Amino acid sequence: MHNGFRSKLPLLLTFCLFTAFLPASGSVLCPAVASDEYYKVARNYGKDGRAGTDGRSGRDGRSGENQNIFVNSSPVNLDLSGKDGEDGEDGEHGDQPDCGSQRGRVSHDINAPNGGNGGNGGKGGDGGNGGSVIVYYSNLADLRNIGVRATAGEGGRGGRGGNGTEGCNCQRRSWEVETCKGTPGSPDYKCTDKVYRCTDGSNGRNGSDGSDGSQGHLGTLSIINSKEPLAGDTPTVKLAISQLTNKQFNLSKNKWNLRKGATSLLAPGSAIADDYSEFEQRLEAAFQIVWQERQPITSFGNQAVTLNLTDNKQVEITFPEELWVDGNTKSEPNLTTFTVNYAIPKKDVTRLAVAEFANAGQNLNLKIVDLAAKSDAINTQFRVKFRAQDSLQGFSSYKTEYEGDIPNELVTRDYNRFTLALGKLKIPDKALRPGVNVDIEVVATRSLGIRSAKQTISWQGAIRMPR
């Protein structure tokens, strides 16, 4: 019985006992009130089965130990194998529901208890990787004295899902309850039979099986023809652009060649990945920046710049997307110099705006201004779509008279002002007359070095009489 109702029932019974001594009009209705309240609270009966707990995932296998060794003619055996992952735990079975006892002819539909769901199986742990070995040698043949076992650990098996339990079946699937309205003996008194039903409980679902763990990777071999350990390398440096000025940065890189046939170098029976790395040489280079941009380098704040030493002993510099840079590189033995001629924030690249639409006919011009004043450094190309109002089609209809690139000879630049000679394009004379309404869309392609961006500029209005 529902806990909330259980606390209310004694109060209802007490109220009924009290009213039994009052006039009959008050006492005969009390049992019906208690019965309705009871069935409103408890629509279902019994208790659903509890779901089973999911199984825990297995732990990953430990990877094999990494080793650095210096070899000679003495035999060496290394076990660098990865360990197997643990199996995942099985999920618990769902609990059986408490089917209880179905109540009598209640005035509502009821549901039998549902079965409990099974818990999901835990994932198997991943196998550990074989360890890596770095071998320093003077005589390559000495590697045949080294036995290495760097096998991969197997993945653990996934746990099995728990079984769900069956739901309860109804003891009585349907019944009729008579309901009367009005006053007995009067013409408005009427009784009807209504059918109510019980629905069987749902079966709990079975839990899902856990996935198996992944197998680890074989260990790897690296060989170095030297008796001295390699120095650490710094092939990449990332720093704020403001830290570049008046400094020289030293980069270093240990260059390796990737080869095949690792097991053929080692003692018979060795287990390791076939690909191995052979040290070729150490690369070292210095980098320095020369700043010739008019704005001081400190004005660009903390924008990050990356320096990278390549296998060709070249230093590459990468600027952030938000900064457009044009410059040139000069490479000398052990020193790379990069001269910055222009540095422009990306937000200043697309700040073009219409300044003036003037004249008519072949003298029709559209003037565009660069509000960021960067056009002495940025290359700009224009494409235009020129539409004129077609009076034959009505006031709101425009017809495309020209669409294409504007030749360079029809574009003039005066510092940060561009004049587009639209009247010199292949546009019909009737579309260039004063009073004609036009809709102009200009797409400007702005580029600097390897970067480019497009900006669309629109203008709409009437061609005016020349002054």
Image (cartoon, rainbow, N blue to C red):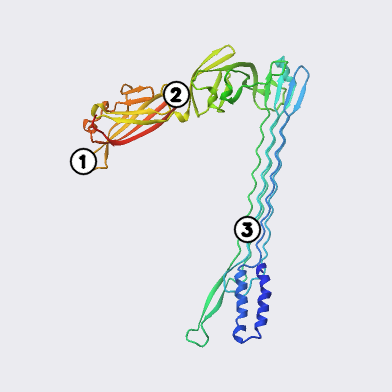
Q: Earlier in the sequence, mark 2 or mark 3?
A: 3
- Which mark's residue is nearer the viewer, 2 or 3? 2
Q: Position of residue 92 (x, y in %)?
A: 69, 53
- Residue lying at 65% horizontally and 70% vertically, measured from the top left: 5
Q: Find disc 1 in the rendering and name its residue.
A: 392
How many neighbours does mark 1 have within 10 angstroms: few (below 14), some (14-19), or many (20 or more)?
Answer: few
Disc 1 residue type (three-letter): Leu
Q: Nearer the viewer, residue 232 or 261?
A: 232
Q: Quadrant of residue 238?
A: top right
User: Which residue is nearer to you in this view: 144 or 455?
Assistant: 455
Residue 210 visible in the picture: yes
Extreme residue toward the front, this view: 467
Q: Which residue is mark 3?
A: 204
Quarter occupied by the C terminus = top left
Examine the rendering and report whether any part of residue 2 can be seen: no
Q: CA distance from mark 2 to mark 1?
A: 45 Å
**Residue 208 % position (x, y):** 63, 50
* Distance from the alpha carbon under mark 1 to that under mark 3: 74 Å
Q: Is residue 167 above or below residue 274?
A: below
The secondary element bearing badge 2 is classed as strand
Q: Amino acid at mark 3?
A: Gly
Q: Kindly identify which numbered label has been placed on residue 312.
A: none
